[in-house]
Image (spheres, rainbow, N blue to C red):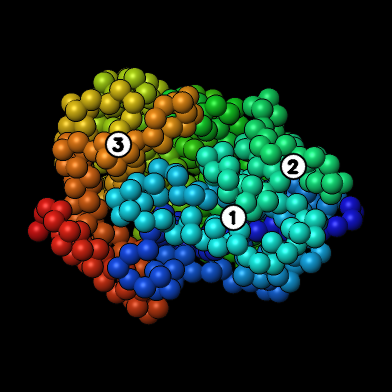
Amino acid sequence: MLSGKVVLTADHTLMSDYRHNEFLGFGACAPPNFIPNWLYRWLFFPPIKAENGKPAAAPYGLRKIEAQLLSEGFNVVTVSPQHLRKYLDEARVLGIHVMDPFGLGPASSTFASILKKEPFLAQYFRALMENPDMQKAKKQGMKIIVGGPGSWQLQYRLNFVKHYGIDCVIMGEAENVIGKIVRSAMRNEELPKFYEVPVADAPAVDEIPDIVNPSVNGLIEIGRGCCRGCQFCSVTLRPLRWYPYEKIAREMKLNIEKGRAECMCLHAEDVMLYGSKNTIPNEDKLLRLHEMVAKQSNSIAWSHCSLAAVAAKPKLFAQISEIVRQKQAWWGAEIGIETGSAELAKKVMPAKAHPFKAEDWPEVVKTGMGLMHDYRLIPAATIIVGAPEETEDDVIRTIELIEDLKDCRSLIVPLYFVPMGRLKDEDWFKHAELTGAHRELLVKCAEHDFRWVNDLIESTFAGKLYSNVLRSFYKFFARLARYKIRQAGIPLEA
Ligand code: SF4
């Protein structure tokens, strides 16, 4: 074992199990609002239990890094942020996992521009960095390395990086490089301030270690990458890899054995394409995967799926729903609608509708959303506002599509365009650029969400006595939010 300890952590908004509902995690993207901060945190991102400072579960990406470093012989411990003090004296390296550290991600930047305040996740990240024990350890020579899906944001905050003495920021899949960088840090060698992992260094499936401690909400990857090539997305730049059943089963077993069997959240950019080499779902593999998970877990969730894959195989989707609903009444996933305009779809996401044609995108959305409604997958769907080349007519088509989806049980979240992927050199969309049509689109999304929110709360907190209490809190919060929006002069339907 290498001498010196590596301590891994993340801020409070990431060290939560969101009451076993990933949807609630969206709450950390909002800024402080009309209820006290402590109550908001209790509702949306309560702290995860920790024993001796070690969290019962941690973000999956952090667990992967922990596993990789352990496999290379490092002395590693993952610690909850409120317990850092106890571990920092011995730490030679502190690794910090970030998701959206400055609130520049699409959801948080949209909420922040509308409410004109810094989102919770940015506030908690700064609070973590301001921890006096961390600054003390830094003065004694500890190195700070930041990584995770949101690490790109530090490029836009160079003063922050300097001020808090961040030694190295890793962007991309780090399994093949983290050991080398941590080793250099321990030898006090100069580290690259920013290190973007080249696509060629993305690990192959057999180079990705299994996690060795539980992940938040039983999240386990079933694959990485995406073949659809949307221009605004950075995931698509990486190779597509699917994990074999055995690897998935091992991580599932680990979570179950360590007491996290409440839920297994299958993570991929499109769970419906598990094991597929193109955009047509592979029936055998998908059914086998779900049967395997259903046998062992108390409930199943998906991280993401595509409307096109659901619409392409309605019968298969119905079969999967049947397997999932042996365990639960519904399940959730994030999906991307992005636009209701076939013209814009052709320009910025020509393969999103595949195997259907891009010009059929609005119909694909309606079919996919209708199937999700019928078979009780509840989607949290995103819409991009202000994509490059978007015209007024594109926005009007999106408004019409949302009206057409009004009977589909879902949340629809509008997100201001953030330059990423092949569009990373484009300009950010700014609140001041909102047109009348954009405002109408935002109102339509809010009306849609308020129409469904009580149904979603009922579905989420059905059953137990404790759930009844929570349900009342969330319903009260939703009513208050609606009241405040109308009070601000925004014309929501009665
Ligand atoms: S389908 Fe989703 S993950 Fe795939 S490229 Fe498009 S936005 Fe990215």
C-alpha separation, residue under disc 1 versus residue under disc 3: 29 Å
Q: Earlier in the sequence, mark 3 or mark 2?
A: 2
In the image, residue 345 lies at what x, y percent?
Answer: 31, 24
Residue 76 location, quadrant:
bottom right
**Residue behind label 3 places its C-beta within 8 angstroms of ligand 1:** no
Q: Mark 2 or mark 1, which is nearer the start of the sequence?
A: 1
**Front position among marks 1 and 3:** 3
Q: Which residue is mark 2?
A: 178
Question: In the displayed structure, would residue 66 be above or below residue 288?
Answer: below
- Of helix, strand and loop, which one carries label 2? helix
For residue 82, above or below residue 413: below
> In what quadrant of the picture does the C terminus appear?
bottom left
Which is nearer the eye, 300 or 452?
A: 452
Residue underneath mark 1: 59
Please say if the residues under marks 1 and 2 sit with CB atoms less than 8 Å apart. Answer: no
The residue lying at 22 percent from left, 45 percent from top is 442
Q: CA distance from mark 3 to mark 2?
A: 36 Å
Question: Where's residue 491, x and y in %?
Answer: 12, 53
Q: Amino acid at mark 3?
A: Val
Q: Residue beneath label 3, please?
A: 385
- Ligand 1 is within 8 Å of the C-beta of the residue at disc 2: no
Helix, strand or loop at label 1? It is: loop
- Measuring from the top left, give residue 253's x and y in whole percent: 66, 56
> Distance from label 1 to label 2 (Cα)?
17 Å
Give the image location of residue 97, x and y in percent: 62, 51
Viewer-side residue, 101 vs 2: 101
Q: Which mark is residue 112?
A: none
Does residue 459 lie above or below 105 as drawn? Answer: below
- Write the residue at 75% across / 62% down: 137
Few, some or many residues within 10 Å of mark 3 (<14, 14–19, 20+): many
